[in-house]
Image (cartoon, rainbow, N blue to C red):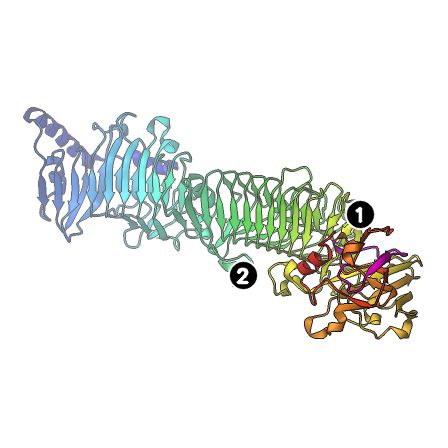
Amino acid sequence: MTTDERTFRKRSRAVFLAAVMVLSVAALSTGFAGSAAAAEVAVGNSDDLQNKIDAANTGDTLIVKEGTYSGVTITTDGITLKSASDADPTIEGGIYLPSEAEGEPVGSVSGLTVDGFVIQQTTEGSQALDIQTGGSSDNPQRNIKFINNTIKAPNDGYAVFHGGNTKNVTYEKNTFTTVEGATANKLVFIGGERSYGSDRGSTEVNITNNTFSGSTSAIDATPKDGVGLEHEASESKIKNNDFSGILDSVNKSDNVVTIFKNDSVELGENGLSVTSSEALSNQIQPVITFVGSGQTVNINSGDYQESLTINTEVIIRGPYAGVSGDRTDRSDESEATIVGNHDINANSVIVNGVEFEELNKENAVKITGESVTINNSVFDGPSTSDFNSRDGYAVWVEGRNAKISENEFTGFNGGVQLTSDSATVESNVINSDVTGIGQSSGSDAIASYIANNTIDTGVQGISGWNTDDMVITNNTITVNDSEYTERGNFQQERSIDISGDNVSVTNNTIESTETGILVESSATADVTIRRNNVSADEFAVNASEYEHTLDATLNYWNHSEGPNAAAGNGIEGDVTYDPFLTTQPDQLSVDTPSETTEFGHDLTVPADGNAYAVAFPAPVNGTVSEVFGDVDGVVYAHDGNEWQTGSQIADQDVNALDAFVVINEGEEDLHISFEYQSDDGVAPSMTSADLEAGWNYIGAPQSGGSDEAFSASTASVERVVNPMSGPDSVPYDVAGDETLVGSSNVGPFRGYWVFATDDGEIGATVVVDPTQDQEQSALSQSS
């Protein structure tokens, strides 16, 4: 409140002194005569309304008919001024409630109701409704209601000038506006401790369901104090008011509403509607400061140059609430853009449908409160090349149970940094410079759920440093470090980084210019990598420092023949990746990978020049030359009489239990990738192997003891010998024993010499065109 505003409290009001004297006489009269019964008093246009008021007793109701009446002073307690039915009486010159605090020899008014009037003032620089500061601190203006009125401010004045030391005053369903052609200094001023001191504070001054309209521009008042409503009272309700009618008139730098008592003002169930960023300037913070727990602040389009601190549970709704941040039908002109660095310290805050812009390479939003939700919002930040910086994230989360969903992030060091537990980061689009979603090594980030995000970044897609109980699923992650030659602490670019316990990575599409999935030495044995589509220029999976065997089966490695079919995309470390999917996971026609028939195997023959025994437990796609490919060495098959090789076997189908000897004389390991044949490509003869009396070179139908594995033969099998090693990698850990003695275990992907006492036949255990689950069950049923 300015000095000019305070002068209104000191105005000379000689016109009212007579009324004060009348009040004194009336009081003496009442003292001798006793209290009169409450009555309804009709007031017509020819009556003097002031005289009727002065003559009224406590409890009286004055029913005022249509007409124009002169301004009045009210000093009587407990009276009601009410317009007659279908009437809109006008009080020309306003209503004045004086007090001895303003030098008048009267006390403070209580119990007054004014209902249904047009109250207007045409004297420039004054006010239509003037409630002066109440008397002593224990005698405030109190228990007053102004309802259903139209209160009009003069030029350079106020519709309502409401002083301090008031209690329980209600303004409801009024219209605050200006007389024709006028521009108000301020429509409504509610004074309190801020302007009048601690012994003149106001409480319970409620502003509900009112309409603010007309022209107002803080001619002599301070614009930041609110040109529509300046409210200094505590313990008040401000709700469901419409300020839209004044927005076109105010200066772009002026605040429409300002509320100063920040510890107890309650905004109603529908919240306070902030309807113009240009008019409000830095107005969001005061509104948020005073909003009641669980209430809503609606923010319309425009630029807000401010940093917010949110210490109250609020719901902030922008113009795009409910609209995903990456939707193309969002426009910059229609966004509510908040420029700054923001702290959310309260629990259960919801931010929906706004745009955050950060200019200084710092964190745009820092969350310390629990159960905070940010969704359907847009984050724009500057680019960075400082890979060692902990700052510069769009959202930095330190509070538990945060949910960051359906936002779009552009720029920044990283999109989201998680340093606490049980966060959900879901359905976001993140285009950041260094990290998509980070979880620092020294933090308490556990139980993170990261799903359905699209991440495009330079060095690290999703970090799981020391993060236990983490789920990463259904994300699309692209990491391209081609523009970054100096990466600070990031010595190895990676799409996903795992170094915790109980980590699940499923159904993701991963693309990287270096490493797809990096599994650190600190990761535990409880890591699952399943049904992902992984493509990397160097390593699809790098687990070279991992201290356990990594389960990475049933993933698609960007090729139907597995991770080693093309340059790059290799597997480093103790990783079980076989069986693998032969088609992209999103194209599978089944719900779980174990139900698919679209899987393959990759048997590895070392490049050491030794002979290895390789067999196939069911008919596979392709001829011998197609299955084994370009071998730098020799592939042998035995026809029952002699060894054959080269063109002798190149065009032969590979049937169930066919066995081969492979010698790899090249410089790199030989990967034999294959799929099983489908039903329509298999003849009955391809599902079993003939046995002749004597020695036969065939594969085992299943794993387990040799007696049981070959027990389905129609001929008696007397002896099983394995003079050669099997392939280095076999699925399901069914390689069999290296040396076969007696009834030792055999493996279904390895050839054996079998001695039969007579002619016969042995059938395959694996059905034609098996699902992965059927194959595993058949091959490992006796292991």
Give SS at disc 1: loop
In the rendered structure, does residue 724 fall within the stretch colored magenta? yes
Q: Give the range drawn in magenta.
A: 711-732
Query: Which of these two is toward me, 145 or 709?
Result: 709
Residue at 94%, 59% (x, y): give it.
609
Relative vertical location of residue 89 with respect to residue 509 in this rendering, above or below = above
Q: As shown in the figure, which amino acid type bears the numbered disc 2? A: Arg
Give neighbour class at mark 1: few <14, some 14-19, many 20+ (Cα, 10 Å). Answer: some
Q: Quadrant of residue 558?
A: bottom right
Would you say the magenta stretch is mainly helix, strand or loop? Answer: loop
Relative placement, left or right, of 707 versus 165 is right
Report if residue 1 lies within the magenta region.
Answer: no
The residue to which callout 1 is attached is 544
Mark 1 or 2: the one toward you: 1
Quarter holding the N terminus is top left
Q: Mark 1 to mark 2: distance in Å?
A: 41 Å
Q: Give the label on residue 281, or none.
A: none
Residue 432: % across, % down: 65, 53
Residue furthest left in the image: 33
Q: Position of residue 333 (x, y in %)?
A: 51, 59
Res 327 label:
2
Q: Nearest the camera: 406 or 41?
A: 406
What amino acid is labelled 1 in the image? Ser
Q: List x then y, in percent, for residue 474.
A: 62, 56
